[in-house]
Image (cartoon, helix red, strand yellow):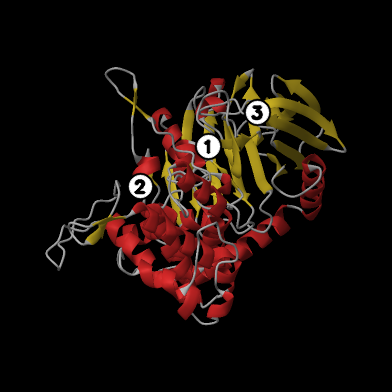
Amino acid sequence: MQRSADRSGWRVAEKGFQKGRVEALGAKFFMGNGYLGYRGTLEEFSSAERVACTLSGLYDRRGRAWREPVNAPNGLLTVLESGGRPLNPLACRVVSHEQGLDLRRGLHFRRTVFALPGGNRVEVRAERFASLENPHLLCLRYRFKAQGACRLRLSTGIDAAVWDINGPHLARLALSSSAGLLRALATTNEGGRVALAEALEDGPGGLGVVRRGSGILRQGSLRAEAGREYGFTKFVSVFTSLDGVKDPAAAAAADCARAAGRGWDRALEGHTRLWAGRWAESDVAIEGDAPAQEALRYSIYQLLSIAPSHSDRVSIPARGLSGQVYKGAVFWDTEMFMLPFFLNCLPALARNLVKYRCHGLQGARRKAASLGHRGAFYAWESQEGGEEACTLFNITDVFTNRPMRTYFADKQIHISADVAHGIWRYFQLTGDESLLVEGGAEVIWECARFFLSWAHYKADKGRYEPGPWRGWPWRPRASSSGGSPASTPRCCAGWDLKGTWRPSGTSPGASTCRPRTREAGSSSSSTATTAWRTPA
């Protein structure tokens, strides 16, 4: 397998097929829109090849396994067969193959030529995208033609045999067809609902609807004429119980039918228009270094594909929406590494990311209280509501197979300062005081209360010192006063304590930026904030 050369810097592709690269390419050629992510797998692949449509914000737990995001049924499954043999690179000889991404348009593409017994060949071409215009929508255009006349069998529809790391998560499943749509309605172990509807346009005639295992498919045979191109377009709409609709199944069906009525061209036009707008605000051109240009644009593409534009109650998980690794949890990396990009290029998306932390304040308060502290201690692995998803024993000893105690959840205290820092940076760069009014100031305040609770006064040394903590990354720094070296968590805590009086007293419109509610013992008086400056 080799990289496909492209001097424009807008196309990332690989030529040739290698079985050992299937899983890696699933992540590399991922596409998404912040609501869902679809791995870069081929249309004929199944759960065995880790096909996944990962949903943002919907989590589920099976038994005692780790809780993780839910993967929806695969509505893009499409398989061609010749002589009872699927045209699949894993089971059929490949003459040529190319797969990649059009970064400018947020479009996944593939072209494969299969060799059939007797010397005939069949070419398959497909393009697909996760719509930016309609975050519930997946669109696929599929084309095929045979070099010589032959009989082919086409199956396309919904495959509910979902790949999970710690599943299955779809505990109950109902498959049906009505009004020209294929439909799937699944209920998770925790009672969440996932609804999917699929519509086919411009497809070959004579396709019937059949049930096959945990899938519902349109299936039929055709006599392919030599050199004639056949194909179809399909539209898949996904809704969940988090979307604020009374009936996710009805919403998915209506949305899918509407998309099919508009057609591929209009859906692609709306999608690419929004991608053009994002690139206009975020692209960086590098002259004279094509590999660097490709790498930079690819990285920006990944950020643009996973940022939630549809809601401020979800954020960017550690592995984006390319699967369930890291439990789909949100880490401090979002504020410290990804937020600066959005702050400087797309502040509306940045606002969603920091507002997510405001919605998670109660979860952070509960975590702090559970450890005997006041204020807000944000999660190392944050899922919905800011709840901590990280366990205290989350690594297994490779020699004894026993769980090992780790300190991510209860000692990585810098996370609260990272969250507060992200909120304050948003305000500094945008001047949007409404975020502080809508909970941002309260978050900064409660994080400072946590750090004050976590510190203790050493009378023999005449100073405040931190409680037990772990820093990531470690960054020793010599103290100018000759004291102990400072490191990232200590610096972050000091910043938050020093900065707390800003939203409570010295920012523009300070009277409107005070915390809206307070726990017992909380105070924003000048006496309290002045007292906080000493440990800071």
What amino acid is labelled 3 in the image? Asn
* Marker count (numbered): 3
Label 3 or label 2, whichever lies nearer to me, is 2
Residue, disc 2: 412
Residue, disc 1: 41
Q: Relative to the observer, which residue lies in front, 201 or 244? A: 244
CA neighbours of label 1 inside 10 A, class few (<14), some (14 to 19), many (20+): many
Mark 2 / mark 1, whichever is N-terminal: 1
Mark 3 / mark 1, whichever is N-terminal: 1
Q: Residue at position x 66%, y 57% from top?
A: 268
**Secondary structure type for disc 3:** loop
What amino acid is labelled 1 in the image? Thr
Is residue 107 visible in the rendered image? The answer is: yes
Is residue 157 visible in the rendered image? The answer is: no
Relative to residue 12, is residue 500 depicted above or below? below
Spot the residue most to the left: 482
What amino acid is labelled 2 in the image? Gln
Residue, disc 3: 189
Spot the residue most to the front: 459
CA neighbours of label 2 inside 10 A, class few (<14), some (14 to 19), many (20+): some
Relative to residue 145, is residue 463 depicted above or below? below
Point out residue 387 in the picture as x, y percentages from the top left corner.
53, 44
Q: Residue at position x 44%, y 51% from top?
A: 12
Label 3 or label 1, whichever lies nearer to me, is 3
